[in-house]
Amino acid sequence: MLKSIFAVVAGFLTVVVLSMGTDMVLEKTGIFPPPSEMGLFVTWMLALALFYRTIYTILGGYVTAWLAPQNAMKHVWTLAALGQLGGIAGVIAGWNLSAHWYPIALAVLAIPSVWLGGWLRTRNDLNTTAL
């Protein structure tokens, strides 16, 4: 049970730590405005953030599948559900912080991104099982 919880938490932390770390680097280098000026984000900034957050979400699904003690995709689906709930919360909380398409896109991409990461990790396992 603890290994299962760890696998899901590790995938979640992968997404959060990498996303926040990249945000911080982009803010410190002056590419993104500081968090106090969130309204200054323009479309290309939001598109860039959506891109790297989607990549990190795929990686989170991969990490969860990799660390899952068994039934990797079951763990991936648990992470996807948590990501979807977080995405919905982000839509509600971030509605007035940026263009509306951005939090909606994050929420819509949560499940397919996590699933893709899990699939990428398990696809070889699935191929060898089928043989």
Image (spheres, grey):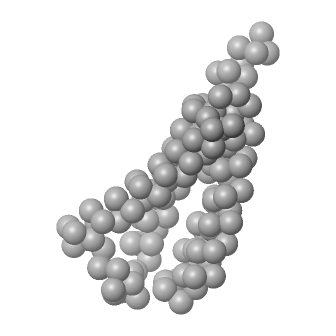
**Percent position of residue 74, x then y:** 75, 39
Return the x and y of residue 63 as percentages of the image width and height.
Answer: 54, 38
Q: How many marks?
A: 0
Residue 17 visible in the snapshot: yes
- Please name whichever residue, 2 or 130, is drawn nearer the observer in this view of the structure: 2
Residue 127 in the figure: left or right of residue 15: right
Residue at the image position 34 percent from the left and 87 percent from the top: 37
Q: Can residue 65 be seen here?
A: no
Q: Is residue 93 above or below residue 66?
A: below
Front-most of residues 6 and 85: 6
Does residue 100 lie above or below 5 as drawn? below
What's the residue at 53%, 89% (across, down)?
Answer: 96
Task: Residue 21 in the image: state x and y as whole percent.
Answer: 34, 59
- The residue lying furthest to the left in this view is 29
Whether residue 115 sits left or right of residue 54 in the image: it is right
Q: Is residue 18 above or below residue 36?
A: above
Q: Residue at x 53, y 55 (%)?
A: 54
Location of the N terminus by quadrant is top right
Q: Residue furthest right?
A: 130
Q: Is residue 99 above or below residue 22?
A: below
Residue in the image at 57% along x and 32% along y: 67
Q: Quadrant of residue 3?
A: top right
Task: State the quadrant of the C terminus.
Answer: top right
Task: List the single residue furthest toward the front.
Answer: 2
Give the x, y percent position of residue 92: 63, 82
In the image, taking residue 6 as reference, residue 14 lies left or right, namely: left
